[in-house]
Image (cartoon, rainbow, N blue to C red):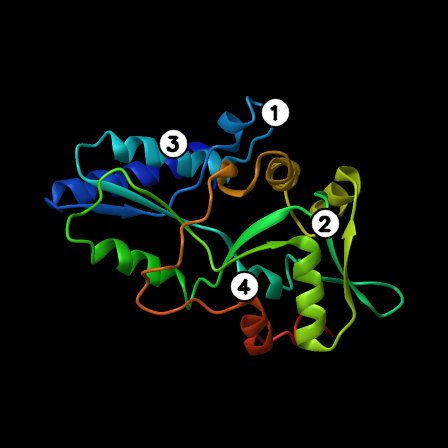
């Protein structure tokens, strides 16, 4: 989907909600990595959601942005594998960012709704609030280690160059612009932090505790990835 279409459809959603007379809007946006980096990095998916967020905040309806971290289910996506099999039969978690780079990850099925519920159950709808919904803040090295421990497979972190990453993404069917945007996202994360450096929202006060990454790893179906 093009940036223009994504923004247009997002604005239509805001307009439709406003037309029904809703008392508040909860939207799942993303930060603009282009703005954060002063134009050094960009990703149309992030820019589109950031533009819709700005539009929503100006719409005149109480508005809360509940941003999701990286989806844990991405680790299980065989068509865009976060974990790849090496020639020696072991597995790697490849990234253009350093292994110490911390990612905010969300168990979208189990935990994201807890943050939305937390907003809805506040005594007063918190207009203007940004919520950075996260299950775990983990370095990429820790991700690989815990996947290895939880699955019994040898999984290690592996830093790769942007050129190698681009070749890999394009071989998976990514258009060159989308591949470049994905690479920019991880480079921005390393330089400026996930959520643009904004801290993850505390899980204290949620109706239920979030699961640990180790718990998620053990419950996940890795059969399409660790083969």
SS of the residue under disc 3: helix
User: Mark 2 and mark 4 in contact (Cβ < 8 Å)?
Assistant: no
Q: Which is closer to the viewer, label 1 or label 3?
A: 1
Quarter placement of the C terminus? bottom right
Q: Residue at x 78, y 38 (%)?
A: 163
Q: Where is 106 relative to 89, above or below?
A: above
Q: Which circle's residue, 3 or 4, is located before the other in the chain?
A: 3
Q: Nearer the viewer, residue 6 or 163?
A: 163
Label 3: how many Cα within 10 Å (few below 14, some 14–19, many 20+): many
Q: Residue at 13% across / 41% down in the picture?
A: 19
**Camera-nearest label, 4 or 2:** 2
Secondary structure under the numbered disc 2 in the rendered image: loop
Labels 4 and 2: the sequence-earlier one: 4
Q: Which residue is mark 2?
A: 99
Label 2 crowd (10 A; few <14 / some 14-19 / many >=20): many
Residue 32's mark? Answer: none
Dot 1 alpha-carbon crowd within 10 angstroms: few under 14, some 14 to 19, many 20 or more = few
Report which residue position mark 4 lands on: 73
Q: Is residue 2 visible?
A: no
Q: Which residue is mark 3?
A: 51
Which of the labelled discs sits on residue 40, or is there none?
1
In this rendering, the count of numbered labels is 4
Q: Position of residue 223 (x, y in %)?
A: 66, 76
Where is residue 206 drawn, in percent x and y? Answer: 33, 62
**Looking at this rendering, what residue extends furthest in the front direction?**
204
Q: Quadrant of residue 222?
A: bottom right
Residue situated furthest top in the rendering = 38
In space, the residues marked 3 and 4 are separated at their CA atoms by 26 Å
Residues under numbered marks 2 and 1 in contact, where contact means CB atoms less than 8 Å apart: no
- Determine whether the residue tagged by mark 4 lies in a helix, strand or loop: helix
Disc 2/disc 3 C-alpha distance (Å): 31 Å
In the structure shown, which secondary structural element does the residue marked by tag 1 occupy? loop
């Amino acid at each position: 989907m093009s940036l223009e279409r994504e923004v247009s459809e997002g604005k239509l959603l805001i307009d439709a909600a406003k037309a029904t007379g809703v008392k508040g809007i909860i939207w799942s946006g993303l930060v603009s990595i282009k703005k954060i980096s002063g134009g050094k990095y960009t990703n149309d998916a992030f820019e589109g959601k950031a533009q819709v967020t700005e539009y929503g905040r100006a719409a005149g309806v109480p508005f809360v942005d509940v941003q999701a971290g990286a989806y844990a289910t991405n680790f299980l996506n065989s068509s865009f594998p976060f974990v790849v099999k090496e020639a020696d039969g072991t597995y790697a978690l490849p990234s253009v960012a350093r292994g110490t780079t911390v990612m905010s990850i969300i168990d979208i099925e189990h935990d994201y709704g807890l943050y939305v519920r937390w907003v809805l159950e506040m005594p007063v709808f918190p207009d203007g609030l940004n919520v950075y919904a996260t299950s775990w803040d983990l370095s990429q090295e820790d991700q690989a280690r815990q996947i290895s421990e939880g699955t019994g497979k040898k999984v290690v972190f592996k830093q790769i160059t942007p050129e190698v990453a681009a070749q890999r993404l394009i071989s998976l069917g990514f258009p060159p612009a989308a591949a470049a945007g994905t690479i920019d996202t991880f480079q921005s994360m390393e330089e400026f932090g996930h959520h643009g450096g904004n801290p993850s929202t505390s899980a204290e006060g949620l109706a239920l505790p979030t699961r640990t990454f180790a718990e998620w790893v053990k419950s996940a179906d890795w059969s399409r990835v660790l083969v």
